[in-house]
Image (cartoon, rainbow, N blue to C red):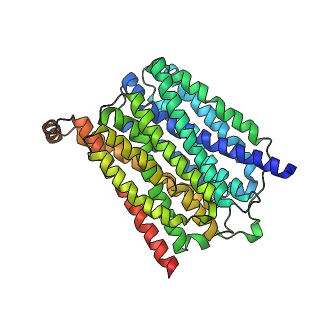
């Protein structure tokens, strides 16, 4: 085994830890929704706003720094990204101490900081892996994005179990413990070898790609995939605990972690099979399965079936985001790191808009007097009816993804 292979293996490990760290930045706060709501009197709309801020910040970073990696190299951004996540998590943990009467402003500021780090991770991690000299791009990219899923599983399960063992007020210590991971990741990126992307003289221009109808379709597909994935992952914890009235630990471990495990399994399998997969076909069928899963989760009166639908939904949505990056990288091999950043920005638009929209739908419906009476006739609370209705509305996003993929495959066959 050559030293070069060993070195690049360490680079891949650092990138995988980077996406694991991004999973902490994205999924830690939603896991704490109910403790934060109960301790500080926050509404579902305010909690959804934190998710919106998270992904809008990532979106701006994707857009603003889309050309920075190509101009200045991958390493500076790869180091700064986890340092911002570390700073934001620490500040969030101390927010109640900074503003004891109303910590929401500090929550917002710290969310912006660690979300900026998460956005920068999207700008460089996929391009770094794509630039590594290997013939197995699909495999490397699938394993990279599987790391996000395993991070999702670990952060939700460990956080939930820790809260159960100690108390819901222990969330500050939990956040400080998680902040150590991005600090370690920053140190790793100072040392590992990094291969830069497509040389400037060979790089395909941004204007050419934005005018290309296939690139527009890729933007729509990843928007729909980000919307569908985050609609479930960001609200599943609250939906299971309050929407179908199950204990938080069983809902988080079975539902939320089950969703993430299946998403990770889907991406790991695609990494194992590599180029033998018909990626777009699997993505298209996955969207149809996802629509069915969301509808079942929203309307089923059986809690076991609600959770099963959420779990299967993880497998159905698993390839939507990384699969789009694979299709685009194969279709536009001379595009620079900015292409991954712009695609991530489209995904972040969906990932920010959809959970925020569902949170406001849940709040709006639950406060209407007619809904309160109707929900009582169904034997559920208005809050449960609002959460179920919001979840049902989330089925629109995989439908959009299915239609875009159908267009893509039809035109490819022509």
Can the viewer see residue 50 in this picture?
no
Residue 178 picture quarter: top right
Q: Nearer the viewer, residue 277 or 205?
A: 277
Name which residue lies at 70% across and 54% down: 129
Query: Which residue ends up furthest to the bottom in the rendered image?
Result: 414
Number of numbered discs overlaid on the protein picture: 0
The reply, left or right, for residue 6 in relation to residue 154 is right
Which quarter of the figure has residue 241?
top left
Work out whether residue 296 or residue 352 is closer to the camera in this orientation and state it: 296
Left or right placement of residue 402 versus residue 73 in this view: left
* Residue 165 location (% of width, % of height): 48, 18
- Vertical position of residue 199 compared to residue 257: above or below: below
Residue 267 visible in this rendered orientation of the protein: yes
Q: Is residue 171 left or right of residue 34?
A: right
Extreme residue toward the right, this view: 3
Q: In the image, what residue occupies the spot 42% across and 48% down?
A: 312
Q: Position of residue 359 (x, y in %)?
A: 35, 42
Q: Relative to the observer, which residue lies in front, 297 or 174?
A: 297
The picture places residue 86, in percent across and down from the top left corner, at 63, 33
Q: Nearer the viewer, residue 102 or 413?
A: 413
Which residue is at 68% across, 60% downward?
A: 137
> Is residue 246 shown left or right of residue 133?
left
Residue 334 at x, y = what percent? 69, 69
């Amino acid at each position: 085994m050559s030293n070069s292979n060993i070195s690049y293996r360490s680079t891949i490990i650092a990138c995988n830890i980077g996406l694991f760290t991004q999973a902490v930045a994205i999924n830690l706060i939603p896991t704490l929704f109910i403790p934060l709501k109960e301790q500080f009197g926050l509404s579902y709309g305010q909690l959804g706003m934190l998710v919106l801020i998270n992904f809008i910040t990532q979106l701006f970073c994707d857009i603003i720094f889309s050309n920075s990696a190509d101009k200045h190299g991958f390493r500076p951004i790869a180091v700064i990204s986890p340092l911002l996540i570390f700073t934001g998590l620490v500040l969030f943990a101390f927010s109640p101490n900074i503003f004891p009467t109303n910590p929401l402003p500090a929550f917002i500021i710290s969310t912006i900081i660690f979300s900026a780090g998460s956005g920068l991770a999207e700008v460089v991690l996929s391009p770094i892996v794509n630039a590594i000299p290997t013939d197995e791009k699909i495999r490397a990219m699938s394993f990279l994005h599987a790391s996000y899923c395993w991070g999702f599983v670990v952060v939700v399960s460990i956080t939930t179990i820790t809260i159960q063992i100690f108390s819901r007020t222990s969330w500050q210590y939990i956040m400080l413990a998680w902040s150590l991971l991005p600090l370690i990741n920053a140190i790793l990126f100072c040392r590992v070898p990094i291969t830069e992307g497509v040389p400037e003289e060979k790089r395909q221009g941004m204007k050419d790609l934005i005018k290309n109808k296939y690139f527009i379709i890729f933007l729509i597909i990843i928007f729909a995939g980000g919307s569908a994935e985050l609609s479930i992952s960001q609200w599943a914890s609250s939906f299971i605990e309050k929407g179908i009235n199950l204990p938080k630990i069983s809902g988080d471990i079975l539902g939320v972690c089950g969703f993430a495990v299946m998403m990770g399994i889907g991406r790991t399998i695609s990494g194992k099979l590599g180029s033998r997969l018909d990626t777009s076909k699997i993505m298209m069928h996955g969207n149809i399965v996802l629509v069915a899963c969301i509808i079942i989760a929203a309307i089923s009166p059986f809690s076991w079936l609600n959770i099963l639908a959420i779990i299967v939904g993880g497998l159905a949505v698993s390839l939507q985001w990384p699969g789009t990056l694979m299709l685009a990288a194969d279709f536009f091999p001379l595009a620079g790191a900015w292409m991954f950043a712009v695609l991530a920005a489209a995904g972040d638009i969906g990932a920010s808009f959809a959970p925020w929209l569902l949170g406001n739908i849940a709040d709006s419906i639950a406060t209407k007097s007619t809904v309160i009476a109707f929900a009582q006739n169904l034997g559920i609370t208005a809050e449960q009816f609002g959460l179920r209705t919001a979840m049902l509305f989330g089925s629109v996003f995989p439908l959009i993804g299915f239609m875009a993929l159908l267009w893509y495959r039809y035109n490819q066959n022509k």
